Image (spheres, rainbow, N blue to C red):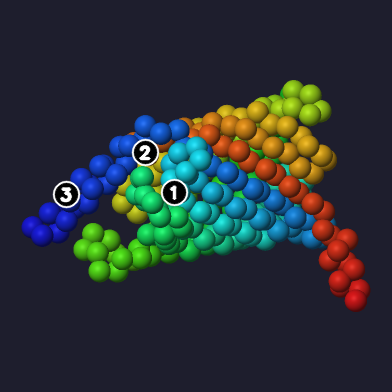
Amino acid sequence: MKRLLYVFLLLGTTLIAQQPGEEENGIWYMYFGMNKISEKFSIHTEAQFRYYETSANFNQLLLRTGLNYHINPNAIATLGYAYIDTDPSFDSNETLVNDIGENRIFQQFILKNKVWEFLFEHRYRLEQRFIKVEDENSPFFDDRTEHRARYRIQMTLPLTDTFFLNFYDELFINLQDNLFGQNRLYGAVGVNLTDNSSLQFGWLRNQFSNTVFNRFQIAFFYNPDLSGVFKEKAKN
């Protein structure tokens, strides 16, 4: 009976905290990098700063890295690690309070193909999530390990040498209770800044079981070739 009461209290608290956040158009500031270190290997680097509102009210910090193995130009396998710092409360005065901390290991496989002018990318990802709540005395939460599968289909359409459109849909599947995790639907306009860098200005509809969040996204992509640097270090 006590456990059931805790569940109802948690659900009530969560709904109260989330409702105002649903009404806000938040923003995600993002950086992605694929840093080539040899003919077959590159390093993935990523940082995301997510806010409930467009300029304030921190929600989440995500840092991710991984080692990519390029099987061929259209197939990439990745083993990586991510750290996530989350403030689940809307309208909090804190910044990076680490109410929920997560260490994550992931395995990923990407396949690319082209149909006419459309560039398609299929991303398959498995995640092992080690989640820790800062307040260890809370009766509502326990430290836990969760497993999740993700599939994303992405389509890019070049408009000119400089501008392009990018769309994707990504489904999250929990490999324990509550099979459906979330679904992300995304559309953006992209600008190629140089041969190895670009910007995207987009809109994300992030749907969970009981709520939907709309988020602006500003993403910077930078993919330098560092293989020459690593060759020089190997010689020395």
Q: Earlier in the sequence, mark 1 or mark 2?
A: 2
**In this rendering, position of residue 200 left or right of residue 125:** right
Residue at left offset 61%, top offset 38%: 218
Residue 192 sits above or below residue 47 on the image: above
Q: Residue furthest left?
A: 1
Q: Quadrant of residue 201?
A: top right
178 with respect to 163 (left or right):
left
Other residues around mark 3 within 10 Å, as few (<14) / some (14–19) / many (≥20): few
Q: Is residue 212 visible from the viewing direction of this image?
A: no
The foreground one among 168 and 135 is 135
Of the image marks 2 and 3, the number of the one nearer the N terminus: 3
Residue 39 quadrant = bottom right
Residue position for label 1: 59
Question: Label 1 vs label 2: CA separation?
Answer: 10 Å
Numbered badge on residue 21: 2
Estimate the x, y position of residue 80 in percent, counting from the top left. 59, 61
Q: Nearer the viewer, mark 2 or mark 3?
A: 2
Residue drawn at point x = 37 percent, y = 59 percent: 99
Residue 138 seen anywhere in this rendered image of the structure: yes
| Mark 2 → mark 3, Cα distance in angstroms | 20 Å
Q: Given this view, does label 3 or label 1 mark the residue nearer the observer?
A: 1
Q: Mark 1 belongs to which amino acid?
A: Asn
- Which residue is located at x 53 percent, y 34 percent? 216
Residue highlighted by disc 3:
8
Q: Residue at x 77, y 46 (%)?
A: 73
Marks 1/2 in contact by CB < 8 Å: the verdict is yes
Q: What amino acid type is highlighted by mark number 3?
A: Phe
